[in-house]
Image (tube, rainbow, N blue to C red):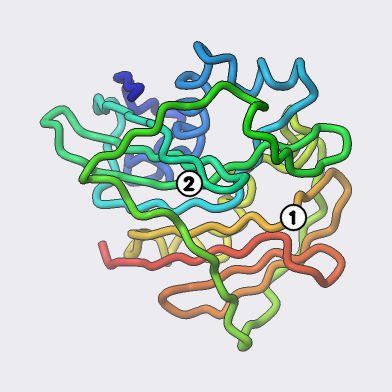
């Protein structure tokens, strides 16, 4: 189990001086990277072997959003490996040790050239699985409702791309959050976010965003009329 303390930066808060939802996912990315460095299973080490980590699913439960300058503890640990899939859990605790955010995720290893999933169990050293009673159950498949409407379009640019040469995981969350406006977020916040990453999105791809506009709210991102990402968000009133 890997854990460390950090403070909420003013660069990562919104108009309420609370942690931005998108910043949660950046914190988790950083935690996963740090936790796997010693075993050489981090993204940088694997890139030297032409291997990439890709996230396939993630669920995040937000109990409370920490405030600017608040100290938090981020905890992450691997779950039991599944067939070609590597679970990872996350917890964020406040200074009193109370869990304020928790998440579960599923990851896969792919060949950086062919983009095909690597199935061998010896690709990386075995990550010793752990479990806690507080962890969020592993994420499941999201089914997009048939009734949906077109929200908008975006062309993926250089700044959207990460070192894996595809759209960064956090950019998907930004698309998800931007379906609603400032007025909506003044009186609502996400309490549960579920993400299914289906296909990679690359630079110069044109994405079309669809939503069903209810609570829970579903958002689908398509490329060439085919789903690349589906998200589901449940909101609570502030």
Query: Residue visible at 60% across and 74% down?
Result: 211
Q: Nearer the viewer, residue 50 or 32?
A: 50
**Label 1: how many Cα within 10 Å (few below 14, some 14–19, many 20+):** few
Q: How many numbered badges does the structure rendering display?
A: 2
Q: Position of residue 221 (x, y in %)?
A: 69, 64
Disc on res. 199: 1
- Is disc 1 in contact with disc 2, using a CB cutoff of under 8 Å? no
Circle 1 — which element? loop
Q: Which mark is residue 105?
A: 2
Q: Is residue 33 above or below residue 155?
A: above
Q: Please state the horizontal and vertical placement of residue 94, each as a whole percent of the image.
A: 20, 33
What residue is shown at x 64% (from left), y 24% (from top)?
43
Question: Which residue shows up at 56% across the image and 21% down it?
Answer: 125
Q: CA distance from mark 1 to mark 2?
A: 16 Å
Viewport quadrant of the N terminus: top left
Q: 55 and 202: which one is in front?
A: 55
| Location of residue 4 in the rendering, given as x and y in whole percent from the top left corner | 32, 19
- Asked which quadrant contains residue 9, the reply is top left
- Residue 98 sits above or below residue 191 on the image: above
């Amino acid at each position: 189990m890997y854990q460390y303390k950090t403070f909420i930066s003013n660069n990562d808060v919104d108009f309420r001086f609370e942690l931005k939802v998108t910043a949660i996912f950046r914190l988790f990315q950083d935690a996963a990277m740090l936790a796997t460095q010693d075993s050489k299973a981090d993204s940088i080490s694997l890139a030297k072997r032409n291997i990439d980590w890709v996230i396939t699913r993630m669920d995040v439960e937000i109990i409370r959003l920490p405030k600017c300058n608040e100290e938090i503890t981020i905890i992450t640990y691997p779950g039991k490996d599944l067939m070609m899939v590597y679970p990872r859990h996350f917890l964020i605790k406040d200074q009193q040790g109370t869990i304020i955010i928790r998440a579960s995720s599923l990851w896969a290893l792919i060949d950086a050239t062919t983009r095909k999933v690597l199935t061998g169990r010896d690709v990386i050293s075995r990550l010793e699985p752990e479990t806690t009673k507080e962890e969020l159950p592993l994420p499941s498949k999201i089914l997009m409702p048939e009734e949906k409407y077109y929200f908008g379009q975006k062309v993926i640019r250089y700044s959207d791309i990460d070192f894996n040469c595809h759209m960064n995981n956090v950019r998907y969350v930004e698309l998800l959050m931007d379906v609603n406006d400032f007025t909506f977020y003044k009186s609502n916040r996400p309490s549960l976010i579920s993400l299914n990453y289906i296909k990679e999105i690359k630079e110069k791809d044109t994405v079309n965003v669809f939503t069903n506009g209810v609570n829970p709210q579903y958002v689908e991102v398509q490329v060439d009329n085919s789903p690349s990402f589906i998200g589901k968000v449940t909101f609570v009133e502030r």
